[in-house]
Amino acid sequence: MNSTPATAPGALPGVGHALKFLRDPLAFLASLPAHGDVVRIRLGPRTVFVACDPAVTREILLDPRTFDKGGPFYDKARLLLGNGLGTSSWQDHRWQRRLLQPTFHAAQINAYATVMTEEAAALAKTWRPGQIIDARREFQSLTIQVLNRALLSLREDDQRLLARSLPVAFDGVYWRMVIPFELWFRLPTPANRRFAKAQECLRHVAANAIKEHLRAPDGPSTLLSTLLDARTESGEPLSERDIHDQLVTIMFAGTDTTADTLASAFQLISMHPEVEARLHDEVRTVVGGQAVTPDVLPALDYTRRIVLETLRLFPPGWIVSRVTTTNTELAGHHLPAGADVLCSPYLLHHDPSLFPDPDRFDPDRWLPHQAEAMPRGAMIPFGGGNRKCIGDQFAMTQACLVIATIAAQWRLRSASPLSPRPRMSLGPGRLRLTCEPQPRGATADGTP
């Protein structure tokens, strides 16, 4: 069967479904499964095929040669991330992953975990009772500091430049992803100038990091030293552009996404007192009033389930795009070579056939007997197949340890409605949390 996929209703002349996608992308995606397993939409002049079925999504993710990185989202992401691990074609991805994989081995992550707990404790010490924090900004600063100490060793002024530039650069790329009119981004608007400046700053940070390492080559081993010592498949050293692309890719994947997950988790915890009570009980039982250390991680079972459920509800990588490398079939539909294909972890994670009452925050979905009953590929916050995020365990370890470290000292209160904000990463956007100290010796409900 080579039927034509159904086209989503509501396309407008010239822009197609771009306005709907721009106004509320999550609601628009959620409307598509009613029209079929694969649904055709138009984003400006581009026709895009959206996978709306778990099996179809899995087929796409497990066949990177046919469904290669590309399409309307990754083409724009390359403006910032270049040909790094997250955006490279399958041919380049193989040697890039082999190059970077040792950096993310379990033994290495255990070493990074000490940095994670130290930096989380240092952040928690800066807060005061009643203080209102900008959660995303705080957690982004934290994740940048962890990434820098664990992998980069940037100078302090470059760390500050990185913290200022990353949000601007990521927002600029997102708008270029969802607005399909190239001419707009060639205009000398303030936003376009800020984006160009942020790109320049990131190149400056990467170039400085390379210079500093070359000036002191006998310093501690870092991701940068790995890249400088590396060779391509043809035996050539990586160019400065190659190194820049890998550095910026790791900066994005290791900071923005985890910061959004932490902000979302603490907002969800604040909105669910029973979850908060169990979290504080677990942390109190595990650490006994002492500082959280990496060795307690295996005992933080409920904390881990909170992180998993947060990633289900609000997967940072909420949408991915691919491009077909040859004529192929998808769910019985013929797709020509060069076709743009989208699939969405967010859409999959909110499928009621996979997750009953999908909008409910329930960490107990991840109890072993329930998790084992889920179909393969139902939960893909880090992608799937051999393109699965290389830093998934780094991110999970950091999220669990940071939540436990902060929960040992604070309760974070949110008065904001739950309103996920899609950008390059999915999170709550600007979220203000009020710090309330955790009473010493109290039970989870606050009584002595």
Image (cartoon, rainbow, N blue to C red):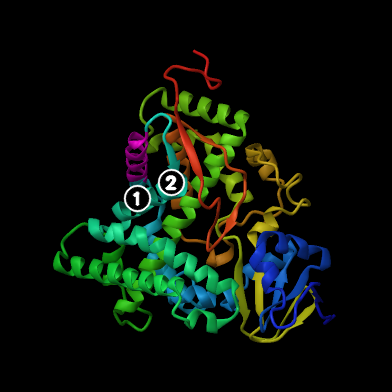
Please give the name of the residue rendered at 62% of the width and 45% of the height, measured from the top-left corner: 418
Q: Main secondary structure of the magenta part?
A: helix
Q: How many marks?
A: 2
Q: Which mark is residue 146?
A: 1
> Outermost residue toward the front?
189
Q: Is residue 351 above or below residue 278?
A: below
Using the rendered image of the protein, determine whether residue 392 is visible from the camera's viewpoint: no
Residue 225: image location, x then y, percent: 26, 65
Please state the extent of the stretch shown in magenta in the rendering: 113-127
Please give the name of the residue rendered at 71% of the width and 75% of the height, measured from the top-left corner: 49
Residue count near mark 2 (Cα–Cα under 10 Å), binned few <14, some 14–19, many ≥20: many
Contact (Cβ within 8 Å) of mark 2 with mark 1: yes
> Outermost residue toward the top?
448
Question: Which of the pair 13/257 is nearer the observer?
Answer: 13
Query: Residue flagged by tag 1: what amino acid is it?
Result: Val
Please give the name of the residue rendered at 33% of the width and 47% of the height, measured from the top-left corner: 111
Quarter where residue 144 is shown: bottom left
Please give the name of the residue rendered at 41% of the width and 52% of the height, measured from the top-left corner: 140
Location of mark 2 (residue):
398
Would you say 183 lies left or right of 113 here?
right
Question: Which of the pair 177/405 is nearer the observer?
Answer: 177
Would you say 319 lies left or right of 370 here?
left
Q: Quadrant of the N terminus?
A: bottom right
